[in-house]
Image: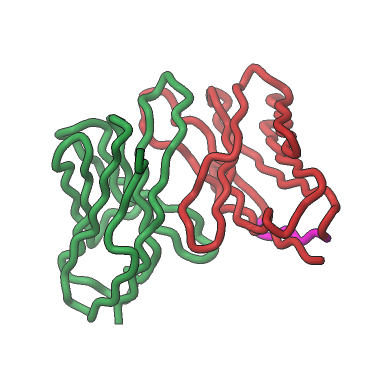
Chain colours: A green, B red
Amino acid sequence: NAGVTQTPKFQVLKTGQSMTLQCAQDMNHNSMYWYRQDPGMGLRLIYYSASEGTTDKGEVPNGYNVSRLNKREFSLRLESAAPSQTSVYFCASSEDPGSSYEQYFGPGTRLTVT
Amino acid sequence: GEDVEQSLFLSVREGDSSVINCTYTDSSSTYLYWYKQEPGAGLQLLTYIFSNMDMKQDQRLTVLLNKKDKHLSLRIADTQTGDSAIYFCAETPPPGSYIPTFGRGTSLIVHP
């Protein structure tokens, strides 16, 4: 099993450009998440998807959109990148509530917006 | 304030024990977790404790849970330079939620 995979690993964008971060998991998990990590801020939830066909906003959704393409894939889109979106982005998946609910994280995408 | 609080930094000498502390607020949490993030990588579950336990030991790791004070700690015995990482405390989502709550992470620096 590959676990949670993310592409790309690194990206540099100019202000105003758009891009999509891709995430896929092969653990048959229902729940998937997008977080951003900034120094001293810990992890902040951008969007999550409790199951295929549903998405919900997290703590910091402004400037982002998501698509739960199927059970395996959950993408994050920046329509018009801003320097404030320079961050490390992590995708995660988890088992359903009621189990140990461990989250599995991808390796991250390091995004710089100039 | 934050739901899960941790100190941001801890510095220890190689071979000493490290103790990373965490306080949480949701008394309904079923599980409490410690995740480890090595430089340049994603988070990985290190260990977790079920809420009806007081202690869990796994090789060099000891997790202590004080439910009365809502306090969780992670002790690493014989700390090595490879233990240098950020350690995140997290709690189960509250009932009806899918969102676990993470602390901001404690950066553990191990020096010779």
Give how far across and how far down residue A49 sits, in percent.
25, 38
Of residues B22 and A29, which is closer to you in this image?
A29
For the point 29% across and 40% down, which residue is it? A25
Position of residue B8 in the picture relative to residue A49 (left or right): right
Of residues A101 and A80, which is closer to you in this image?
A101
Give how far across and how far down residue A50 sits, in percent.
27, 32
Give the quadrant of the C terminus of chain A.
Answer: bottom left
Give how far across and how far down residue B106 sits, in percent.
64, 54
In this view, A101 is above or below A80: above
Q: Quadrant of residue B61?
A: top right
In this view, A55 is above or below A95: below
Q: Quadrant of residue B33?
A: top right
Position of residue B20 in the picture relative to residue B97 (left or right): right
For the point 35% across and 62% down, which residue is it? A109
The outermost residue toward the front is A1
Give the quadrant of the N terminus of chain A.
Answer: top left
**Chain part drawn in magenta:** B8-13
Position of residue A8 in the picture relative to residue B27 (left or right): left
Q: In terms of secondary structure, what is the magenta stretch mainly?
A: strand
For the point 17% across and 77% down, which residue is it? A16
Q: Quadrant of residue B11?
A: bottom right
In this view, B55 is above or below B15: above
Give how far across and how far down residue B67 sits, in percent.
68, 25
Number of numbered callouts drawn: 0
Of residues B47 and B107, which is closer to you in this image?
B47
* Residue A105 belongs to magenta span: no
